[in-house]
Amino acid sequence: MSTYIYENSNSKSFFNMACISFALSVIAMIVALSYVQIEIGMIAFIGVSYVFSVSSCFTLAKVVRDRHEAEKFLSKVEKSKTEKFLSEQPI
């Protein structure tokens, strides 16, 4: 029985830095939109565009991660199939 060990190359401090920078960027955008001197409709448009951009970034990152994990899994399956095939062949 094989166990799958999740290989995480990110440190705790890198994770914390990513969370803090994300929070600061959201806060900075809210502050910037509150001080800008344009119509409320334009502020709403910029705000919605920002939220859409952030959600698109999260989706893209998830898709890239999922593809990478799938490729690693398929590579392991192919490797085990090859090893099984080679072990069953007479010498």
Image: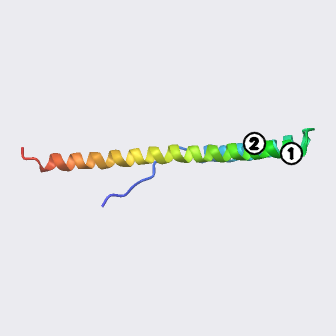
Residue 33 figure quarter: top right
Residue 41 figure quarter: top right
Tell us which disc is closer to us: 2 or 1: 1
- The residue that mark 2 highlights is 25
Query: If the image is split into quadrants, where does the C terminus sit?
Result: top left
Q: What percent of the width, then of the height, locates residue 59?
A: 59, 47
Disc 2 marks a residue whose amino acid type is: Ser
**Mark 2 in CB contact with mark 1 (< 8 angstroms):** no
Q: Nearer the viewer, residue 17 or 89?
A: 89
Q: Residue furthest left?
A: 91
Q: In the structure shown, which secondary structural element does the residue marked by tag 1 occupy?
A: helix
Question: Is disc 2 surrounded by few (<14), some (14 to 19) or many (20+) residues within 10 Å?
Answer: few
Q: What percent of the width, then of the height, locates residue 25?
A: 75, 42
Looking at the image, which residue is at 71% across and 42% down? 21
- The residue that mark 1 highlights is 41
Residue 13 visible, this orientation? no
Disc 1 marks a residue whose amino acid type is: Gly
Q: In the structure shown, which secondary structural element does the residue marked by tag 2 occupy?
A: helix
Marks 2/1: CA–CA distance: 22 Å
Residue 26 figure quarter: top right
Looking at the image, which residue is at 66% across and 44% down? 18
